[in-house]
């Protein structure tokens, strides 16, 4: 509307209130909010999300210690904490070998002057029996027996000890039968395999059985009694008056778990994403406009391809050639990436706030389900005892602390900056799997998996983040 016309309307309105308010009507029309995100459902519908399936069966290592005594075991948790085994702590575990174990197969190696190896694989009882039959053709059978807990043992000379339990074949090698204490320790290791309760080793009868086997096995063998073939109940009855302080502690559940800090440090470093070669950004136009190459978004991941949307002035330009369009779009995309990198800390903060805001509503569930031990710097925690119980308490305290801070104040609070000191960002990033990146003039649309859960986020022009809930 021209200036003269505006002035004319303003004067007329002053002396006649009945005159239609064209100015107000036009201003309201001009200020009508535009739905910047109206096209997002259509964008998302064009993308087929891939299901992220992880076959990794996580291990955890800690120490099971007896109160009032120096006796301790390595506590190995298998299959995401559903089963556990104990091994005398005098053996040194090689953590790196077991990091990629799955629910189908895996291995644990350890040493004590020499190397030992325990491997496992899922198999049927028939497969196990067929394997034992084949081995007997090659190696002399030392013995085989079955425990009262259903564990089936075979041992072959110059080969290994085999055990079938809970649908798995275990093979343990590296021991010598000439070292009788070591020999019993290897059997005790295999016999300690048992189900865990809420990720914890709570079956003291199994621990007592393992302890007696290691402590009294040699002595009884000289008397012609093989404790490996004794039932747990009969063995515990026989040694109920064995007043060793460890036995007394085990009888009264006076044992506790302490996290193996060295394992979690080693695992974090082993799991860091490998630095991949950066691919140069380029623009393609097969049917729709796309980019290919590495678009860096810091903690939110690196996106190797994506779509360009809503650049109609460039897409439909008659003045620009195809090459000029590509060059102009590439320059704009590279600019977007550079701006995001300059704001990467702010974006990371917002991303983490979305996650922990949800997680702190049910912190213990998220602590176990999303395996916070994989990215928490537990070595930095000032806890008197680095046990699971103490760590759970610490997590709950943090959740309570943030519940008393307004969400809009999280990122500027001292509590937030202190909390971030306990997060290994390189390890946290391994939990982020980028899928699609859509770039528009007004926002970026990110589709990714976070802890195996599908997530969609929007990064606006001012680098504020929003989570898109379909």
Image (cartoon, rainbow, N blue to C red):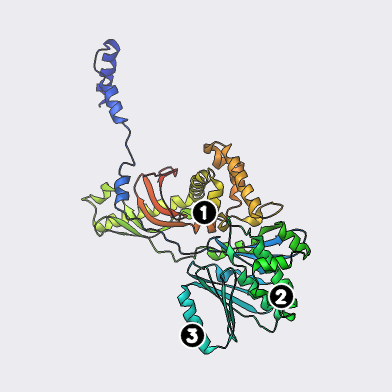
Residue 127 located left or right of residue 438: right
Q: Residue at x 77, y 59 (%)?
A: 68
Q: Nearer the viewer, residue 470 or 245?
A: 245
Q: Is residue 88 visible?
A: no
Q: Residues within 10 Å of mark 2 (few under 14, many from 20)?
A: many
Is disc 3 placed on a helix, strand or loop? helix
Image depth: mark 1 or mark 2 in front: 2
Residue beneath label 2, please?
217
Q: Report the residue marked by disc 1.
A: 369
- Label 1: how many Cα within 10 Å (few below 14, some 14–19, many 20+): few
Residue for badge 3: 134
Disc 2 from disc 3: Cα separation: 31 Å
Q: Residue at x 39, y 44 (%)?
A: 469
Q: Which of these two is toward me, 295 or 428? A: 428
> Is disc 1 placed on a helix, strand or loop?
helix
Residue 185 located left or right of residue 459: right
């Amino acid at each position: 509307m021209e200036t003269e016309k505006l002035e004319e309307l303003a004067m007329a309105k002053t002396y006649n209130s009945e005159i239609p308010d064209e100015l107000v009507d036009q201003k309201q029309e001009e200020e009508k909010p535009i739905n910047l995100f109206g096209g997002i459902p259509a964008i998302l519908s064009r993308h087929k999300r891939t299901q992220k399936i992880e076959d990794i069966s996580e291990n955890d290592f800690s120490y099971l210690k007896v109160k009032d005594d120096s006796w301790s075991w390595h506590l190995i948790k298998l299959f995401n904490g559903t089963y556990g085994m104990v091994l005398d702590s005098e053996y040194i575990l090689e953590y790196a070998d077991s990091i990629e174990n799955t629910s189908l197969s895996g291995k644990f190696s350890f040493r004590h002057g020499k190397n030992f190896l325990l491997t496992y694989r899922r198999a049927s009882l028939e497969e196990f029996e067929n394997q034992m039959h084949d081995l007997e053709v090659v190696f002399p059978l030392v013995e085989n027996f079955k425990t009262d807990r259903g564990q089936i043992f075979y041992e072959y000379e110059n080969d290994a000890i085999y055990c079938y339990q809970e649908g798995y074949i275990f093979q343990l090698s590296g021991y010598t039968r000439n070292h009788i204490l070591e020999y019993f320790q290897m059997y005790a290791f295999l016999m300690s395999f048992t189900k865990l309760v809420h990720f914890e080793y709570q079956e003291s009868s199994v621990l007592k059985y393992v302890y007696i086997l290691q402590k009294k096995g040699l002595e009884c063998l000289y008397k012609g009694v093989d404790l490996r073939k004794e039932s747990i109940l009969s063995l515990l009855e026989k040694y109920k008056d064995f007043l060793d302080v460890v036995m007394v502690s085990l009888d009264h559940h006076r044992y506790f778990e302490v996290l193996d800090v060295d394992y979690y440090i080693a695992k974090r470093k082993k799991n860091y994403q490998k630095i991949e070669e950066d691919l140069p950004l380029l623009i393609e136009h097969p049917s729709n406009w796309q980019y290919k190459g590495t678009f860096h978004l810091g903690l939110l991941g690196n996106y190797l391809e994506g779509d360009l949307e809503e650049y109609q002035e460039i897409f439909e330009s008659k003045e620009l050639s195809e090459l000029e369009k590509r060059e102009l779009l590439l320059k704009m995309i590279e600019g977007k990436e550079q701006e995001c990198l300059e704001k990467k800390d702010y974006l990371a903060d917002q991303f983490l706030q979305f996650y922990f805001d949800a997680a702190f509503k049910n912190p213990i569930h998220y602590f176990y389900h999303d395996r916070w031990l994989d990215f928490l710097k537990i070595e930095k925690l000032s806890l008197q005892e680095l046990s699971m119980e103490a760590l759970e308490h610490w997590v709950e305290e943090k959740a309570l602390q943030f519940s008393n801070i307004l969400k809009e104040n999280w990122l500027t609070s001292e509590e937030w900056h202190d909390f971030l000191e306990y997060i290994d960002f390189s390890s946290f990033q391994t939990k982020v799997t980028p899928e699609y990146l859509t770039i528009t003039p007004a926002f970026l649309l990110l589709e990714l998996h976070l802890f195996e859960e599908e997530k969609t986020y929007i990064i606006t022009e001012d680098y504020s983040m929003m989570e898109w809930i379909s």
